[in-house]
Amino acid sequence: MVATNALRQPTLDIPDIPIRTITADDLKASLREGYQDFLAKRGDLFFAGLIYPLVGFVAAFGALGSHMLYILFPIAAGLSLLGPLTCTGFYELARRREAGLESRWRHFFDVRKSDALDGILGVAAVLIGIFIAWVFTATAVYEVFFGRETSSSIGTFVTQLFTTPKGWAMMIIGNLIGLGFALVAMAVSVIALPLLVDKDVDAGIAMRTSIRAVKQNFGVMMRWGLMVAALLVLGAIPLFIGLAAVLPILGYATWHLYTRTIDRTGIPSQPHR
């Protein structure tokens, strides 16, 4: 605990953390560096990447077992809203690796010892709230088009979606609404969580900095969000198993995106504890 605190740099409660303007080249470099980090640590961390697919399986069995097939996709898609939270352990490992420190699987859980843990939990509460709001909204959208009727099988449900005007309308409207939720989740967390792992700031400053970074680099950040979504979809296709590799790569890549977006030399630091 003492050693972990000594390695961190608690920061002042400052209103405006310096933000850089980034380009598409920064996205490519972040992904490349994230992949290199994964190759270096894949043996220790493959287990951590399994957290996401396991949650996906639980969601799938829950929906199938309760005959609520219509909520399966919103839950599976909504898990991406919690992705940044799942990656906090990878941010810590990337931070340690960047500093030349030992970074083995046990350090994945060092986030719980962080001086900024209350801030991390604050952002986590916001993301969980967004996820819950999305699931309820998706349920409401389904009921607008199909009422409270449920499909008896996956085949019937898929037919209902792709062969009826109501099914297509529901998918289009639902996906547009989901895009809005994803944008909000990305804006409040893409920079906030790596910042909280790296520096001892409060949740409000971290989320405000994240939103400012997204606004300043809106086009590039939208491209990043689409890249993340595409990789998550590809990883989820083989029964979520691919996410065991995709999630660590994205976690490391997001850390590198954070270091390219935030000018950390402009953040004043208190003496080490």
Image (tube, helix red, strand yellow):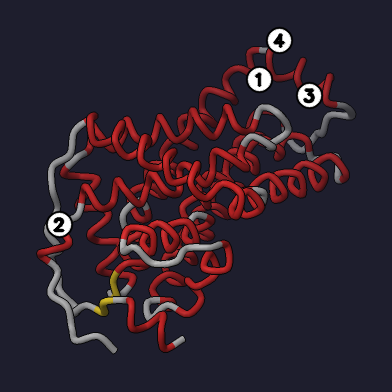
CA distance separating discs 3 and 4: 10 Å
Counting residues from the start of the chain, the first of labels 3 and 4 encountered is: 3
User: Dot 2, how many residues are within 10 Å of its Cα: few (below 14), some (14-19), or many (20+)?
Assistant: few
Q: Amino acid at mark 3?
A: Phe
Point out residue 164 in the picture as x, y percentages from the top left corner.
Answer: 69, 12
The secondary element bearing badge 2 is classed as loop
What residue is pinned by disc 4? 163
Asked if the residues shown at circle 1 and circle 4 are in contact, with their CB atoms under 8 angstroms apart, the answer is yes
Q: Amino acid at mark 1?
A: Gly
Marking on residue 157: 3
CA distance separating discs 2 and 3: 49 Å
Q: Amino acid at mark 2?
A: Asp
Residue at horizontal 64 percent and vertical 40 percent from the top: 76
Residue at horizontal 52 percent and vertical 46 percent from the top: 248
Residue at horizontal 14 percent and vertical 57 percent from the top: 263
What residue is pinned by disc 1? 167
Using the rendered image of the protein, determine whether residue 226 is visible from the camera's viewpoint: yes
CA distance separating discs 1 and 4: 7 Å
What residue is pinned by disc 2? 263
Counting residues from the start of the chain, the first of labels 1 and 2 encountered is: 1
Asked if the residues shown at circle 1 and circle 3 are in contact, with their CB atoms under 8 angstroms apart, the answer is no
Counting residues from the start of the chain, the first of labels 2 and 3 encountered is: 3
Instruction: Relative to 150, say whether 209 is above or below.
Output: below
The secondary element bearing badge 4 is classed as loop
The secondary element bearing badge 1 is classed as helix
- When asked about the image quadrant of residue 71, the answer is top right
Instruction: Relative to 63, say whether 15 is above or below.
Output: below
Using the rendered image of the protein, determine whether residue 140 is visible from the camera's viewpoint: no
Asked if the residues shown at circle 3 and circle 4 are in contact, with their CB atoms under 8 angstroms apart, the answer is no
The reply, left or right, for residue 139 in relation to residue 272 is right
Instruction: Relative to 38, say whether 1 is above or below.
Output: below
Q: Amino acid at mark 4?
A: Thr
